[in-house]
Amino acid sequence: MLVSRDFVSPRSPPRMSNMKALRACTLGLAFAFSSLSPAVVWVSSAGATVLAKVNGKAITDTDLKIANEDLGPSIPQQLKGKARDAYLLDYLIDGELVAQKAKADKLDQTPDFPEKLAYYREKLLMQSLLSKVAKEATTDAALHKVYDAAAKASKPETEIHARHILVATKAEAEAALKRIKGGEDFAKVAKEVSKDSAADGGDLGWFTKERMVPEFAEAAFKLKVGQISDPVKTQFGWHIIQVEGKRQTKFPPFDQVKEQVTRYVVQKAQSEMISELRKGAKIERFGVAAETPAPAQKAAPKADTQKTDAQKTDASKPDAAKPATPDAKASTPPAPASK
């Protein structure tokens, strides 16, 4: 038995989109695979253990495994072991009840049902192949090869830890600077007058020069540790900057960026497979779709292990005009940020 990802059980976590409930009528598509599409059917094998029955229909441990793979991150992370299994079983029971009701209402006999069924069958086949490609691509050797290449290509950069005070006018900035020079704590003044990062005393965390807009970066990186800038104007207003530390970036260890490296390797392998399939296929477009370009290949993710305030695209932050994650060519390994 296959449960659609779009089904929202009463026991589903609150964060799951309520919009999915509006598509509950298509739930019968997934359950109908068992009778209409043998190529994608999951049936109870001789060794499967029956965990429950719903109006005589068995739900097995095989169904539980499939549901676990399908739902993945949407399952509350605090559920482990037997609690997780119980959650999944309830989900499957609710799903079976809804599917049986859908069949009773003859929703599987609507005019567009066969087309939807064919669509979901193709989608399942596509996902199965992409999963297979991903599994084959993400060997330990392949992941380390990409990591080693990125580490070798990475060059140390200077990064600073800074605080800032952001105000609307130069006069306000000069007044804040006067208070600091008079002996008041920078963080205290920031909390009282700054429009940005006030709760953190203006703390921007660690950042490299390219993360900030040019005017702010130029002023900040000229300062020595402990120094405070004169008022600096950017598109966001007037800043007073204090540098609290400087260091050279270090390439993070493999375990710290394994997730990002894995995503890159998977994406690259899947994209290359699809490109090869396109090369060997006869693709004809007609009518409005005749000039539709091929889907754009996503850029390889840049591993970013720590997002500081300076890396959030808030309209008041000095780096807001720049993307939080620089674009990268798909053929270029991700360059993890230091932490």
Image (cartoon, rainbow, N blue to C red):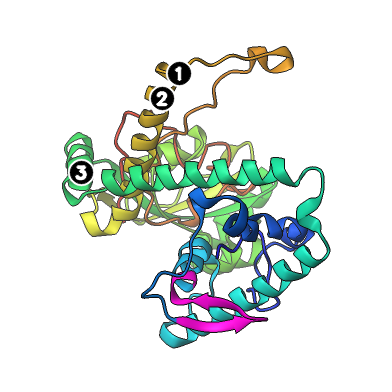
Q: Return the residue at label 3.
A: 142
- Percent from the top left, x then y, of residue 245? 32, 56
Image position of 293 (left or right of 247): right
Mark 2, Cα crowd under 10 Å, few <14 / some 14-19 / many 20+, is few
Secondary element under disc 2, as helix, strand or loop, is helix
Residue 277 has which mark? 2
- Seen from the viewer's position, the closer of residues 242 and 321 is 321
- Percent from the top left, x then y, of residue 84? 48, 81
Asked whether the residues under the numbered discs 1 and 2 touch, taking CB atoms below 8 Å apart as contact, a structural biologist would say yes
The residue at the point 48 percent across, 86 percent down is 83
Q: Earlier in the sequence, mark 2 or mark 3?
A: 3
Mark 1, Cα crowd under 10 Å, few <14 / some 14-19 / many 20+, is few
The residue at the point 29 percent across, 54 percent down is 258
Is residue 291 among what the camera can see? yes
Which quarter of the picture shows residue 111?
A: top right
Q: Nearer the viewer, mark 2 or mark 3?
A: 2
178 w.r.t. 201: above or below? above
Question: Which amino acid, by three-letter code, is at mark 3?
Answer: Ala
Q: CA distance from mark 1 to mark 2?
A: 6 Å
Q: Quadrant of the C terminus?
A: bottom left
Q: Earlier in the sequence, mark 3 or mark 1?
A: 3
Secondary element under disc 1, as helix, strand or loop, is loop
Question: Which amino acid, by three-letter code, is at mark 2?
Answer: Leu
68 w.r.t. 294: above or below? below
Q: Return the residue at label 1.
A: 281
Mark 3, Cα crowd under 10 Å, few <14 / some 14-19 / many 20+, is some
The residue at the point 73 percent across, 55 percent down is 26
- Percent from the top left, x then y, of residue 300? 39, 37
Q: Which residues are magenta?
A: 50-63
Q: Quadrant of the N terminus?
A: bottom right
- Seen from the viewer's position, the closer of residues 190 and 8 is 8
